[in-house]
Structures are given as C-alpha cells and as structure tokens.
Image (cartoon, rainbow, N blue to C red):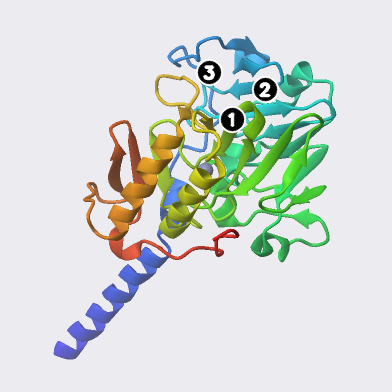
Amino acid sequence: MAKKFGIALVVVILLLAAGIWQRHRILVPLATSGERILPSEKASLPVNGKPVGEDAYFYVVQLDERTFAIAEPYSWPRNVNYLIAGTRRALLLDAGVGFYDIRPIVEQLTDLPVTFIPSHLHYDHTGQGSYERIALVDLPHLRERATGDSFTPSWGEYLGVAEGLEPATWKIDEWVQPGSEMDLGDRQLTLIYTPGHTDNSISLLDKAHDMMFTGDFMSAGNISAYYPGASMGDYLQSARKIIRATAGNPDIALRGAHAGEDGQLPVKSRADIEILRDQLVRIENGELGSTGSYPRIYAIKEDVVMQAEPRWLQNWSTTYPDEEE
Ligand SMILES: [Zn+2]
C-alpha cells in the first residue's frame, strides 16, 4: 500500500514538473480564440489618426515629414507599426498580426524601396505576407539556424499557435549587427539589441530626430516578461543600455509597439526606463512584491505593470554580455 502510494506520488510530482517545464506549450494555445479579428464599433482611436485601407482597419498618424505610425486600433493587441523613411529608402518596423495586409498602406505612404524589419519575432509583429526586402538583427543564435539566408522563426519565437498561424520562412536580405547604423539616406538609425521581452528584441534609435522605437520593451501600460525567451536579466541589461544610448537625448520619445486601452500611441520617456531599471534591481533583490498567480504582476510605476514569472522561475542571466560594458 505504502509502495503504491509512493509510486503515485512520484508520478504526480513528475507530471507537475513536466507541466511547469512545458507551461508555455500549454498556456499559449489557450491565450486567444484563434479567430480573425474584425473591426468593432468600440475601439478607441488615436488622435490625429486617419483611417485607411480595407474596412478602415488601419489608422495612420504622421509623426513628422518622414515618419508614420500605422496603428491597428481594432486588433486586440492594438499594434502600432512604424514606417521610417530617409531619402533613399524606408524601413517598416513591424507589420501587425497580418489579418489585414499592411503593404498597400505602406505603398500609399512612400515611393521609396521598403525593407521590413521586425522589432522581434512574435506573430503579432511579423504580419503574414512576404516582403520584398527583409532585415533581421544579426545574433549568433539566429544566424546559426539560418540555411544560407533562409530563416524560420521557432515555435517559441513566433507563438502564432495562439491563433493557429505558422511562421513563414524568410529570405533575409540584410543581417544587421547590434550597435550598427542603418543608413536610410540623410537619416541614420542605430540598431540597438534590447532583449528582455524576447531574446531577439531590438530598438531603433534616431538620435538626430530625438526618437527611438522600442518594440515591446515598454509599450503603453504593460511589460511582458514571461513568454519563451524572455529574461529579467536581459531586461535589466537592456534598460541600462537604452539609458546609456540616449544620454545625449534627455527628452527623447520612446515609441512602443502597442497602444493602451485609450487607443493612443504609446510614448515613454527616458525617466520611465530609469524607473524600470531601479524596479528591476528591487525585484532581483526580492524587495518588490508581486500579486496574482501566473504571470506574477509587478507594479513598475503607477501606469505600468510588468508580467513576469514567479520568482523561483525568473531568469536573471543575460543572453549575451553587454557589448559596451
Ligand atoms: Zn511581443
């Protein structure tokens, strides 16, 4: 009897351990319905936005002469994609879930050749079409999986299983070194490797125009750090990196990739990143409490929360050493 009970206990413990180990495989498919997202009457729309495209699904906000936010107020993630143009070429940073094709919208906005670059590989940033030109951050752990210049995001990098989507295989035209400049013609963007949300997340810094595009590093009110490839250690390293890279730009606008419930374009300040850095240090030291079951919720500042693993599952190592430290 005692022996049988012992075996049953071991089986239960093993199942629990397997469940925890495989938690993302179990939880991600449950995250959304998998159905196409249709425009509803209820979305909050960005101010100064102009409806464009089929079903007036996209809202374009012109940020300056050569920079456009292409918002998707009707999608549940409320994506904000950016078209960043120089005089010779333009970058499309992110392309939404792809339920509606962003490419005709981009073509309306610029005649320049456009290169797509994802802020990271999650399916709600990659769109579903193919692109004429694709740039990807040149990281050893991505490059080693490329066959020639063909690259396919992995299950955990893409997470499209949440909506029944398979990752495309891309031909990469441009592998961009972290810290290097992308020359758009009379406009230089520095690609800064800012992991944390994922281990392939990047930001684009436009020092001359006082703007930085930070992807999912910190959007409107929510920081997500519990999906596969997320790391608290990376978050802290990247916060320090962003603060350092923007030292000469105290008033820089940090533009994220998801609007909040109010539908407005997400803009954060350098001071917000300093707060995040300090709160991460407190989380690491066990000085900042959290609430909820899974994910755990940390209050970073009054209008920003961080969704993280429970403390005993948090990863405080970094994917790579800081290039400059
Ligand atoms: Zn993401």
Q: Quadrant of residue 163?
A: top right
Residue kind at label 3, given as amino acid type: Pro
Q: What secondary structure is found at the residue carrying circle 3?
A: loop
Q: In x, y percent, where is residue 317?
A: 45, 65
Which residue carries the number 1 mark?
211
Disc 2 residue crowd, few under 14, some 14–19, many 20+, Cα 10 Å: some
Q: Earlier in the sequence, mark 1 or mark 3?
A: 3
Q: In x, y percent, where is residue 223?
A: 41, 42
Residues under labels 1 and 2: Cα distance?
Answer: 10 Å
88 lies above or below 149: above
Residue 95 appears in the figure: no
Residue plotted at (35% across, 41% down)? 275
- Residue 39: which disc? 3
Task: Look at the image and tell me in which quarter the C terminus lies.
Answer: bottom right
Which residue carries the number 2 mark?
67
Q: Quadrant of residue 64?
A: top right
Residue kind at label 2, given as amino acid type: Thr
Frontmost residue, 1 versus 106: 106
238 lies above or below 118: below
